[in-house]
Image (cartoon, rainbow, N blue to C red):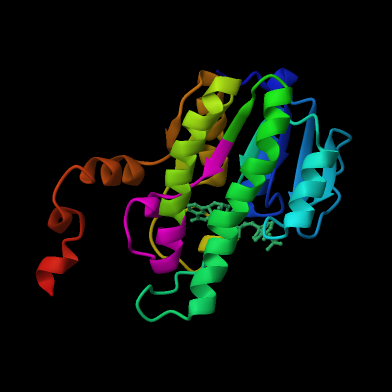
Amino acid sequence: MSVDFTSAVVLVTGANGGLGTEFVQQALDLGAAKVYATARTPREWGDARVVSLRLDVTDPASVAEAAALASDVTVLVNNAGVGSFAPIATGADAELRAVFETNFFGAVAVARAFAPVLGANGGGAILNVHSVLSWIGLAGAYSAAKAALWSATNSLRLELAPQGTLVTGLHVGYVDTPMAATATGPKNDPADVVRDSYAALQAGEFEVLADELSVSVKQGLSGSIADLYPQLLAS
Ligand SMILES: NC(=O)c1ccc[n+]([C@@H]2O[C@H](COP(=O)([O-])OP(=O)(O)OC[C@H]3O[C@@H](n4cnc5c(N)ncnc54)[C@H](OP(=O)(O)O)[C@@H]3O)[C@@H](O)[C@H]2O)c1
């Protein structure tokens, strides 16, 4: 299971965002025949190979309509997400639910809707955009939803292997996009993250660790909780 972009039809959710725009552009650069650039508010892309499509991942009717219209998709980039870091203990219930609606239930709904499409088109691939925060609970509701999505990705990979669908998860720290505009500290270049992600799909890899932080946090999961969260020792 690996992706040849020259024969691929790619669909990107959240295409107007920082990573989404790169996912669209680099799919074209790799020779994709068609790219569905989906967004809550679709825009013009000025390239005949790009099809703009309305898709709100939290709206079941919108998801179903996109899957019916884009029945030739072979690569799904499940990228749309929101960046709310509501604390688990004190965040508003509505905010916790809203993060899960987009980052977990939205991404899962899109994967479920497109799984039969991918199967009918020979297998294809799904790239689910997680985060290093799937593995470290520093971001409250966001960490929890990305952890849940990581788990769902692991299940989808097993469930869709028989139909030949590659399911790959992306983990990365801060990326220099509007979502991380107020974050301090080092940020990855979205172009590098997308390059690594598409290279992983081309190589048939199940996971993308797009920066050193993701590599070290993943390694830390096999150690002690206190090593992963040194701030616990200070409190
Ligand atoms: N930036 C980071 O530091 C970072 C790090 C790790 C992982 N990620 C993940 O990377 C992905 C892309 O984020 P980004 O950094 O590119 O942020 P971004 O520039 O804010 O883009 C996020 C995109 O998701 C779209 N979106 C939000 N809710 C949606 C919905 N209900 N339906 C459809 N689209 C929706 C937004 O659309 P609108 O334009 O309509 O709001 C926006 O275009 C997200 O899953 C994020 O969690 C980001």
Q: Position of residue 122 (x, y in %)?
A: 69, 19
Asked if residue 167 lies in the magenta stretch, the reply is: no
Q: Is residue 111 left or right of residue 24?
A: left
Count the labels in the image.
0
Picture quadrant of residue 106: bottom right
Q: Position of residue 216 (x, y in %)?
A: 27, 43
Q: Position of residue 139 (x, y in %)?
A: 39, 65
Q: Residue at x 61, y 29 (%)?
A: 125
Picture quadrant of residue 7: top right
Look at the image and tell me in which quarter the C terminus lies.
Answer: bottom left
Asked if residue 130 lies in the magenta stretch, the reply is: yes
Quick check: 108 above or below 25?
A: below
Picture quadrant of residue 231: bottom left
Q: Position of residue 187 (x, y in %)?
A: 45, 53
Q: 96 or 130, which is in the foreground?
A: 96
Q: Residue at x 65, y 18 (%)?
A: 4
Look at the image and tell me in which quarter the N terminus lies.
Answer: top right
Q: Residue at x 67, y 31 (%)?
A: 75
Quick check: 78 above or below 71?
A: below
The quarter of the image that holds ligand 1 is bottom right
Residue closest to the far left: 233
Answer whether residue 210 is visible to the viewer in this image.
yes
Answer whether residue 30 is visible to the viewer in this image.
no
Q: Is residue 190 left or right of residue 133?
A: right
Q: 83 or 213, which is in the foreground?
A: 83
Q: Magenta region: which residues?
A: 127-145
Q: Residue at x 58, y 56 (%)?
A: 105
